[in-house]
Image: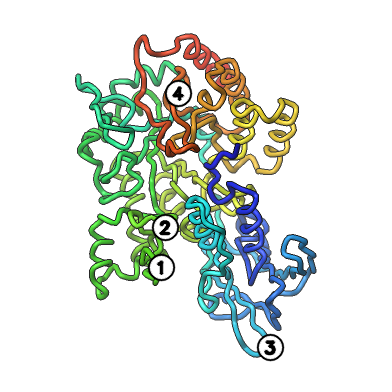
Amino acid sequence: MEDFVFGTLATDNLKLLHHRTRRRGIQHAYQIEPRDPKPDEPITLSVTIGPHLKPARVVCHLNGELLDFEKREMLWDTLVWGYVEKWTLTLAGKPDGTVIRYRISAIEADGRETFADFPEVQTSIEIATSAFFRGESLPDLQPGDRAKGNAFALSVDTLTPPEWAKHAVIYQVFVDRFFPGKGNDWKQPDDLLGFFGGTLWGVIEKLDYIEDLGVNCIWLSPIFDSPSHHGYDATDIYNVAERYGGNEALHALVDAAHARRIRILLDFVCSHISDEHPVFADAHANEDSLYRDWFSFDDSEVGYRSFFGSPRMPQLDYTNPAARKWMIDAARYWIREFDVDGYRLDYAIGPTPDFWTDFWLGCKAEKADSFCFGEVIDAPDVQKHYVGRLDGCLDFFSADALRRTYGFKTWDEAHLERFLERHAAYFTDDFIMPTFLDNHDMDRLLFLNGGDKDALKKAAQTQMHLPGPPLIYYGTEVGLTHEKSSQEGGGIHVSRVPMVWGHGQDQDLLDFYKKIIAERKLRK
């Protein structure tokens, strides 16, 4: 059984399409050495040229100049059944604080120019993945504008991820499902798509429980105004939803948590907003809107680029400077005015990495030790694109390995050990990758393994020995599970059941979690 949380890489056919698209046209894809250049270090840029493009020149557009790449290597790729060229260019080192912005193009003998990255890999694979989940055949497309391509950016600096994050134990709270607070009972919606009534006041009332567990960092699910229970479609990114307690409750939670030396991370969505957001509503209704160019309107069935084709979640186009500034200013606002400690960044692969260069610099300017890590559900080599642009990424691949071993039980522990050893060696120590066993978009581990608590304990024990900070999805520590599978018609929301309190908790499992968290802290 596949874990469909991998979405664009969920099947072998999707993986093959992903690979072939990355080998077409001209692809830079942030192939940079060193990944995170320090002051005065030379910087080598690389591009690959696919079999159907024959450039006379490959050039870097930098500060009004054209700098020529050199052809370095010819690679045979069996999966595209053709030769791929590798070209490189080395730039002189730059002083601290320099942001290098550039574009790259391939110029053919007839003068036709194709800019990197074309075709757009992410757009292509999103379209294919949407088709897959609708049960349709996979389209073989080359989306994008070859005359436009991407703008790339890299920062030359000495910024590093915060030291505290390396020692964090993170607790993921799905706010609507955690605790109502203020003497209120759970609401009784018809299904898991409704509102159950959890609030930030409820989180405050359970800080004793969270602190006693050994947690020193809380990641909150999206808390901004939104029409949905999950909040990943905001209608206002400058206000906490009143159903969670509003801005007052967030101030109170941050103050109360900080008093206990517990950090607070917000779930921040930069990729898309709700179609009910006033900015999009105006852009959609009015072709002369000031916000029209904040989105990519097209002739697709939806009429604009959106999150996996969902009309409810239009994606922002950050080639527009005003849209980019608007989102980054909002991120800076919550750090500056509410003293939050950073962000888990939803669908971080949606915006191109140059956006994250600016985003990360903005957050660090407000709070040098803020922690910003991305949800990048893609291969490890793609996750490396975010080194020097974010503090880290969620470690989906250690989660996959742990779930295969202790959930699906298709791997033995020797296979797991080999994988985890190589996986840890692939990434540098200064790229922080929080580990997890389950989350709000997948079946809980205890559901996958049929309620095998011993297997869950082994998985948790292994997780606590991995280098990345462990992340615990609310309720996993007390045996919370669910009845339906997300992969058999239940939907990805099946794991978002209300938290159990009191006698409903598995005390043996809770005591075990407290023990292994305490042991990890002693090792660190």
Quadrant, the N terminus:
top right
Cα separation between marks 1 and 2: 9 Å
Q: Amino acid at mark 4?
A: Thr
Q: Quick one: label 2 or label 3, which is nearer the N terminus?
A: 3
Q: Mark 4 vs mark 3: give the one in front.
A: 4
Kind of residue indicated by mark 1 = Ser
Foreground of the two, 513 or 429: 513
Comes first in the chain, label 2 or label 4:
2
Instruction: Give the Cα distance between marks 2 and 3.
Output: 38 Å
Above or below residue 513? Residue 216 is below
Residue topped by disc 3: 109
- Left or right side of 523 for 214: left
Q: Residue at x 52, y 58 (%)?
A: 353
Instruction: Say if mark 1 contacts mark 2, CB within 8 Å.
Output: yes
Residue on which the image places disc 4: 481
- Few, some or many residues within 10 Å of mark 3 (<14, 14–19, 20+): few
| Label drawn at residue 15 | none
Q: CA distance from mark 4 to mark 3?
A: 62 Å
**Sequence-wise first label, 4 or 3:** 3
Determine which residue is flagged by label 2.
309
Instruction: State the separation of the CA atoms marked 2 and 4.
Output: 30 Å
The amino acid type of the residue labelled 3 equals Ala
**Nearer the viewer's eye, disc 2 or disc 3?**
2
Dot 2: element? helix
- Mark 4 residue element: loop
Q: Residues within 10 Å of mark 1 (few under 14, many from 20)?
A: few
Q: At 40% across and 63% down in the image, what residue appears? A: 305
Q: Which residue is mark 1?
A: 300
Task: Tell me the residue at 45%/29% (across/down).
Answer: 473
